[in-house]
Amino acid sequence: MRIVVAMRQLADLVEELEVNDEGTDIDREFVKFVSNEWDEAALEEALTLKDELGATVTVVALDEPDVDQTLYAALAKGADRVVKLTGNDPDTWVRSRERAQRLASFLAGESFDLLLTGVQAADDLDGQLAGILGSLLEVPHAAVVVGVEGSDSKVRVIQEMGGGLLGVSELDLPAVLGIQAAKQTPRYAPISRIRQAMQTGEISEHEVELSDASAQVKVRRLYPPESTGAGATMLKGSPKEVAAEIIEIIKSKGLV
Amino acid sequence: MPVGGNKQAAGVTELAEAIVTSPLSGREWDVSGGSSRMLHSRVLTDYSASGFAKIAALEGGNSLEYCFGCGKCVPVCPVDLVSEYGPRKIHRAVQTGLDLFKSDELWKCTTCGNCLRVCPKEVNMIEVMPAVREVAMVEGTIPDELQQIMEKTFRYGNALGENPRRRPAWTKGAGVDVRVLASDPSPVDVLFYVEDYWSFHPRGQQAAQAFARIMTSLNVDFAILGAEEKTLGDSQRLAGEKGLFEALMEEVIDVLAKYQFNRIVTPDPHGFNALKKVYPKYGHTFEALHYSQLLAPLLEQIDFQGSLEATVTFHDPCYLGRHNGEYEAPRKIIEAIPGVKLLEMGRCRENSYCCGGGGGGMWLDGFNANHLSERLSERRVREAAATGADILAVACPYEVSRFEDAAKSTGNEGLRVMDIAEMVDIAMRGEDWRS
Ligand code: SF4
Ligand code: SF4
């Protein structure tokens, strides 16, 4: 089985994000970038399938800040090949549609059975990437996947449904899956292995030219939600006083 | 007669005729039919040495099999007091088939070093455990809690996963100027290596502020690296991440090379241990001091405005005391503070109990909760409370939070936990520690 995992870099949320002067993006200058945690789950699921069935795992990502670290870590964890797609401006926000087009342009020249990516990301909470990829590549798509069982021509996917239910479906290959969780927590890549990958591993680069840049979403305004004034009450005083007040509030609401 | 009245017949392997030959003189004795003979040794099939082969093959792993079972290490092992542990028990378990690489036992050792202190065979768990852990990590066995810490340390340069740019944030509340080398790179006498818990933990920050005030009042020329500082990562190394330690070391060395300083002073015995014992092995030699060693000789110069009026007991950090032989400096400081009476705990100095934070234990509280009858810090706090002291004094940034939590969970809220720098600072400024 040939598995491709698409990963993306995001602003690290330990930082306090600020909006840039134009009000169209976060201020990227001092922000640290890390890989999307759902993409990490997608990678783990791919590596688990590789352990179980034997598979080749290719990881592909756009040229974004600190992406090399993510790709080397993927090699250290057991990916067979890592590819960086160049051609985008690494310092601007790539929206889901453009991201999907860039990935699809690369995948058009790849043969693959499964394409896994995170079901969502901090800048794609509505989880569009996997769906758009499915439509661009004209292959079946499933989202919110929490387990994948594969064979040569089909996969069974377990999906989270509402009301605490799980659904099992079968998809013909090739297919695109938006991964919500892997069967196990993402494995650890010891730093010595990552460093080894940095010395001996290779990131192949692949330039992507987008023909139709005009059809992209244009961000008009990015802003933190305005406070409505009716928000939280800040309790003041020593920890003891605050704790006593909290207990009073809980009591008065009839919660205990 | 044994209890129950049954006697076990001696099960010797007897030969019908037996001749014993002296290897020295060649003289022969006919011992056929004699009593008290066991002419073949019994073949024991319940253990083998094979479990040790994989461990002994590792650098630092060979001493585990030296154990001859004398048992001296078990009563001094802090983990054995709240569980079943110690090198002898680990040795025996491996002998009888335990795969240490996959076992939870691997993560319980705090590398406190008390077993090595008494072991006649120099079975060295401080080398054995990290070596085995390193392989276990590569093979995919690492407790989740610890994995997160390693990832945070690699990503942010600190174990708390805090934004590295906030490292110097504590200086704002110090009330004195703290020079950051990046903005003023002129040569300095003391490079104050603040380390993680004094940089980011709220209680640690208070101690860092106290220490900065003390150094200022003593006219010590000091500066910090601020956002350029990264943890020295000694506990990560002992928890098995040598690769992470080495990666951090390369970055630390690059940053240190930019500045001129005479000595490095750190409050963290773990960082101190790295600078003193591990960095030189890689060819990096610095004059490194624990902050207690910087302060102890300068105390006469402090003009104390007040008196503490407290009884104090002191917890020796494993990596200051046992690992680096410094027992006096913190005691000198405590005794120099006006109005302090020092009460020693039963386990102190060389035989000090371990707070449970070393060797990765700091980050394994959840994991250990399934294995230990109580936390090591809880046991230690009960010992401290039993002395009747008002204050448990500490000299390691891990300990204030560990012991404060333990004081609460064991019902010893009356016991105050304070860093020795905080105590000096309070007496120096004439404040009341009770307020
Ligand atoms: S003290 Fe040393 S030789 Fe004795 S039982 Fe412990 S490890 Fe073995
Ligand atoms: S180093 Fe400390 S915790 Fe580890 S086995 Fe020895 S005495 Fe026990």
Image: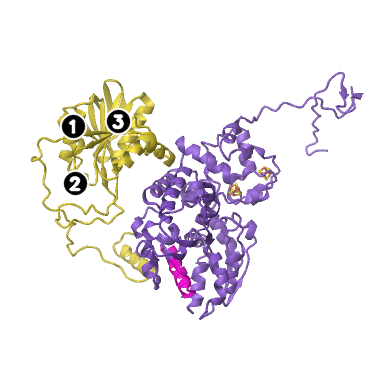
Chain colours: A yellow, B purple
Please report the residue visible at 55 percent of the width from the left and 72 percent of the height from the top: B298
Same subunit, labels 2 and 3: the answer reads: yes
**Is residue B206 rendered magenta in the image?**
yes
**Label 1 amino acid?**
Ala
Where's residue B382, x and y in %?
A: 57, 61
Task: State which tag comes first along the sequence, 1 or 2.
Answer: 2
Give x and y (percent) for residue A40.
32, 39
**If you read the primary sequence from the N terminus, does the residue marked by circle 2 or circle 3 appear first?**
3
Under circle 2, the secondary element is loop
What residue is shown with label 3?
A: A58
Number of the label disc, if any, that sits on residue A104 = 1
* Ligand 1 located in image quadrant: top right
Give the CA distance from mark 1 to mark 3. 14 Å
Q: Is residue A40 magenta?
A: no
Q: Chain of mark 1?
A: A
Precedes in sequence: disc 1 or disc 3 = 3
- Residue that badge 2 annotates: A93
- The type of residue carrying mark 2 is Trp
